[in-house]
Amino acid sequence: MNELSLFNSLFDDGTFGFDFPVLKTRNYGIPKVDVKEDEKAYTLEMDLPGRSEKDVDINLKDKVLTISSVQEAKTEKNAKEDGAWLIHERIATSFSRSFTLPDDVECGGVNATFKNGVLTITMPRNKSATEAKKIAITAA
């Protein structure tokens, strides 16, 4: 199995027996991610325009990385003074994405940065955690 396939999230490829082609072709406000790897780490980048680091929550539990955000709707208190909306498409949005991390991720070293609307999560690799190991058998 390709290590990056472990980063697939629900509905991406029908892993759970579901096949929702509509969900695959439409965005529905769920940010897309890019994941790359090198010998030292996996790097996940997610575009989050209009958000800041205060708007995003990242949790890691049992090798499952969850990124979520709730963006509150901004209400205009003085709508009569400022005029009436003719078009009002920018509304509150929220999302949550979860990723099962590969076994070689060193969870204690995961860190995140946010710059210019791009969230970058770096997950260091620990190759020795996944290397084959011979187990000695002792007589009982």
Image: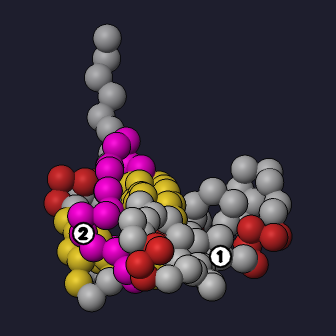
Seen from the viewer's position, the closer of residues 48 and 84 is 84
Seen from the viewer's position, the closer of residues 113 and 124 is 113
- Extent of the magenta region: 40-64
Quadrant assignment for the C terminus: top left
The reply to whether dot 2 and dot 1 touch (C-beta < 8 Å) is no
Q: Is residue 9 left or right of residue 82?
A: right
Q: Is residue 136 left or right of residue 21?
A: left
Q: Position of residue 61 (x, y in %)?
A: 34, 43
Nearest to N terminus: mark 2 or mark 1: 1
Residue closest to the far top:
140
Q: Position of residue 127 (x, y in %)?
A: 28, 64
Identified at 69% across, 60% down, the residue is 11
Q: Residues within 10 Å of mark 2 (few under 14, many from 20)?
A: some
- Is residue 139 shown above or below 43? above
Q: Which mark is residue 27?
A: 1
Is residue 49 visible from the viewing direction of this image?
yes
Residue on which disc 2 sits: 53
- Is residue 140 shown above or below 18? above
Q: Residues within 10 Å of mark 1 (few under 14, many from 20)?
A: few
The amino acid on which the numbered mark 2 sits, given as a three-letter code, is Glu
